[in-house]
Image (cartoon, rainbow, N blue to C red):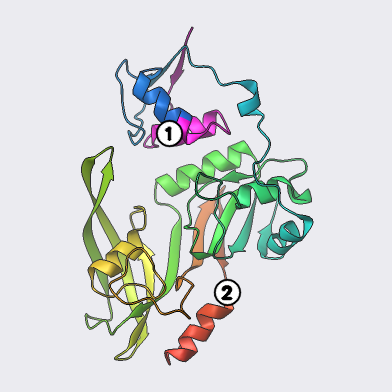
Amino acid sequence: MKKTINVDTTYTGMRIDRFLRKHFDTIPQSLIEKSLRSGKIKLNKKRIKSSTKLQLNDLIELHNFEIKKEIITNKAKFKPSDTIIKENEDFIIENNDDFIVLNKQAGISVQGGTKSKKNLIDIFSNSDIFKDDKPYSVHRLDKETSGVFLIAKNRPTAQLLTTLFRLRKVYKTYIAICHGEITVKDKGLIKSNLIRYDVNKKIVENAETYYEILDKNNNSTFIQLKPITGRKHQLRKQLFDLGHSIIGDKKYNSYKIQKNNKNLMLHSYEIKFKMNEKKYTFRATPPEYFRNMLKVKRLNF
């Protein structure tokens, strides 16, 4: 049995694995990878990798590809308690007919995966806020990072917001506390070539971020970051490459991790976008541990 899907403008530029997750809702990433390797899923009659980006009028072919009903209707693996649901509802900044905005807490993933079960999508799937809707994740925010995060309430809004993110029409501002004194000029543009690996293949991606130093001393730097591109771990990698890794970063760090610095000092502070002719701006207050670190490092916000 063969099924074909034509790619329209809504999904142009999206990775094929992300498209399939949206199209089939709860399809596991592992099944996508396996089906791409075996040739059950092809793009324009060719085998491709999960990172391949879709182009307008591409033809996705599904060969003898069936997702068992129990996968599509699979209940959330993580069953949040009423307490956990209420705790996360308390961090909501905005709740309207199309989306919610919350101040995500560090230590919780956006979506479930092999390494993390506790996640926002499963939590809000069980919230009364979404009793008549389904939560849609429209962008990324690392598990260790706190701050502004959007969840769409319906498919049309999810598709629109996803498109805005892809077209770089959503403007995000982060704040971070870094090791050491950054001695470059106070404002500027960080340009980097970041390396990642996809099935043992080395991939080099350009990354660009506007920055502004908000305060600094000979021990630490408080910095504002506005990413232009959206590479994985972009801000963390760029600051690490500058020799000033973010305090609390266990992955990209050339400094010794102190026992009392368990949290990553990176916070998604603000998000701006225009949707349906209306402008939106949302800000999220930094968590207490972030504010306390500013005091410890004698940095002003």
Residue 38 picture location, percent across and down: 36, 20
Q: Disc number at residue 259? A: none
Residue toward you, 38 or 292: 38
Residue plotted at (37% across, 69% down): 225
Type of amino acid under label 2: Thr
Residue toward you, 68 or 126: 68
Residue 63 picture location, percent across and down: 43, 13
* Disc 1: which residue: 17
Residue 273 picture location, percent across and down: 50, 56
Residue 58 on the magenta span: no
Type of amino acid under label 1: Asp
**In the rendered image, which quarter is residue 34 located in?**
top left
- The alpha-carbon separation of the residues under discs 1 and 2 comes to 33 Å
Residue plotted at (48% across, 84% down): 293
Q: Does 66 sit above or below residue 227?
A: above
* Secondary structure under the numbered disc 2 in the rendered image: loop
Residues rendered magenta in the picture: 1-30
* Secondary structure under the numbered disc 1 in the rendered image: helix
Residue 189 picture location, percent across and down: 25, 68
Residue 3 on the magenta span: yes
* Disc 2: which residue: 285
Residue 250 is at least partly visible in this image? yes
Residue 301 is at least partly visible in this image? no
Residue situated furthest top in the rendering: 1
